[in-house]
Amino acid sequence: MQLNRFDNVQEFWDCTQAYLLQHQGENNVLLSILHTLLHNPERYLGKPYLAIVQTSGEILAVAIRTPPQKLILSKAQNIDALRLIAEDLRQEQLPGSMGLAKEVEIFSQTWRSLTGQFYQRSMVMKIYQLTAVQTVSTSRGYLRLATESDRSLLIEWLSAFLSEINQAVSEDIEHQIDNRLKQQNIYFWVDGTPVSVASSKQVLPTIGRINLAYTPPEYRRQGYATASVAALSQKLLDQGCRHCFLLADLANPTANHIYQAIGYRPICDWHEYSFTSKE
């Protein structure tokens, strides 16, 4: 069993794509990041960490990190492979890890034993998959592509969203918004004025993701989130996607109910851990 790092994103993709696609739902976050690294590398400001653990040519686990973000782990064929990843990164200032519940818990325990750092589960999420949008009652309004004139509002809303889910508002938030506008993948639901925002990505010709959905408090409970996510999910299906994925925080039962009403079905648990020097 050995770990290999990659500097070339295309070589990393060529090596890992078959493995990641075997469980495309569980690995959809990694697939999405790799798509961005290949086609929109300016989205990330730092050099990515790209690693695989393999034995006799067979991949056992994949890990990706785009600093300053947390490490993201794939579904692992052999849990022992996670220790090699932890050992490879032990000298790094790693803020945390995320991945499937079993893999990320074992990695975090290993990180604690290697570094002495404490770990705490900071978010419990569910990965959902959709293959057809269900007919649901939605609010009036329409889906509109966000434009440069919406930049200030998008920064305000994304900052509020991150604060609401207890995520730090990163210094590159303006860069994130500028990149989404450039990629033309962020939309408003408009009912006279923008009332909800959602963002999507076509990761591969047959795989799509909803990677942001937020409605400000003053516009909630009026069906706007349902309408925007349903419309954007249908847009992805119309573009040829056979599967749409999203991550939902289980601490938000309203969002989870909305997604299931639209047609998203839970497939696995996804956890996030934070590492600190103090317990």
Image (cartoon, grey):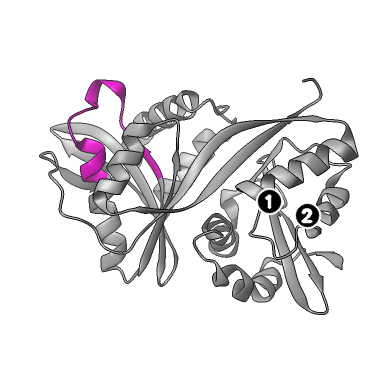
- Name the amino acid type tagged 2: Leu
Is mark 2 in CB contact (under 8 Å) with mark 1? yes
The label on residue 103 is 1
Residue 101: x and y, percent? 61, 46
| Location of residue 59 with respect to 264 vertically, above or below | below
- Name the amino acid type tagged 1: Glu
Query: Mark 2 Cα within 10 Å, few/some/many (few <14, many 20+)?
Result: many
216 drawn magenta: yes
Instruction: Report whether residue 74 is seen.
Output: yes
C-alpha separation, residue under disc 2 versus residue under disc 1: 8 Å
Q: Which residues are magenta?
A: 212-228
Q: Earlier in the sequence, mark 2 or mark 1?
A: 2
Question: What residue is rendered at 20% in x and 44% in y?
Answer: 227
Question: What residue is rendered at 53% in x and 25% in y?
Answer: 166
The label on residue 82 is 2
Q: Nearer the viewer, residue 187 or 214?
A: 214
Residue 28 falls left or right of residue 147? right
